[in-house]
Image (cartoon, rainbow, N blue to C red):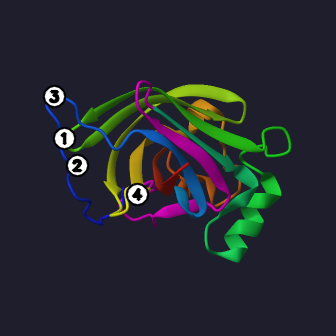
Amino acid sequence: MTAATLTRPATSGWRVSPPEGTWAIDPDRARVAFTGRSSFVAPTISARFTEVTGTVEVGRRHSVRVEVDVASMTTGNRAYDDVISSFDPFDGARFPVAVYESTAVAWTPDGAQIDGTLTLRGVTRPVTLTAAYDVGRSGDQMLVRAGGSVDRAAFGVRFDVPGVGRLVPRVLRLDIDVDVTRT
């Protein structure tokens, strides 16, 4: 999660959650990124995906679904992007979309624990995220920030580029930072 502070959600008895409803991710205000560092002296490696869609459901059944177009990945450095696209670590031709889908959402006074699965390169593995949210004044917009760790080797994501592969850590931080609007 990013360093910005979110307001604490209001509590109602024993139940704590955002307002009920179906919320759609605003693709123009969505950020899904991986970051990590392989050693103390290595640079921080980061990449984000610019094409993001999905929904958040709050109510009788809580759920989160986030989809990213893996071809939309950028490091912010054109030279790195060109190198990475030349060997396609996500096998985007066969698996163009990565999907995070919750299996359970438990709201707490500080946000939520989201158990779910990440499907990447045709491999599905469990990934747990912690989340926080902040509801806009109108009640029809909400900011949701979630993060957790992902072992890229478990999904077969490799960086077999001389001089680059050793810089990319095996375990990366996954951050999902999205604005959602009630539909």
Q: At which x and y percent is residue 53? A: 64, 50
Rendered image: mark on residue 9: 2
Dot 3 alpha-carbon crowd within 10 angstroms: few under 14, some 14 to 19, many 20 or more? few
Q: CA distance from mark 2 to mark 1?
A: 6 Å
Residue 53 part of the magenta segment:
yes
Q: Is residue 13 above or below residue 6?
A: above
Cα distance between the residues tagged 1 and 4: 16 Å
For badge 2, the amino acid type reads Pro
Which of the 4 image quarters holds residue 14? top left
Q: Which residue is mark 4?
A: 143
In the rendered structure, which amino acid carries the disc numbered 1?
Pro
Q: Which residue is mark 3?
A: 14
Image depth: mark 3 or mark 4 in front:
3
Q: Mark 1 or mark 4: which comes first in sequence?
A: 1
Magenta stretch, residue numbers:
35-62
Cα separation, mark 4 vs mark 2, equals: 12 Å
Determine whether label 2 and label 1 are within 8 Å by CB.
yes
Amino acid type of disc 3? Trp
Q: Secondary structure at mark 4?
A: strand
Mark 2 and mark 1 lie on one chain; the one further toward the N terminus is: 2
Q: Does residue 1 appear to the left or right of 38 in the view shown?
A: left
In terms of image quadrants, where is residue 167? bottom right
Q: In terms of secondary structure, where does tag 3 sit? A: loop
The residue that label 1 is drawn on is 109
Amino acid at the residue labelled 4 = Leu
The stretch drawn in magenta includes residue 114: no
What is the CA distance from the residue labelled 3 to the residue labelled 2? 13 Å
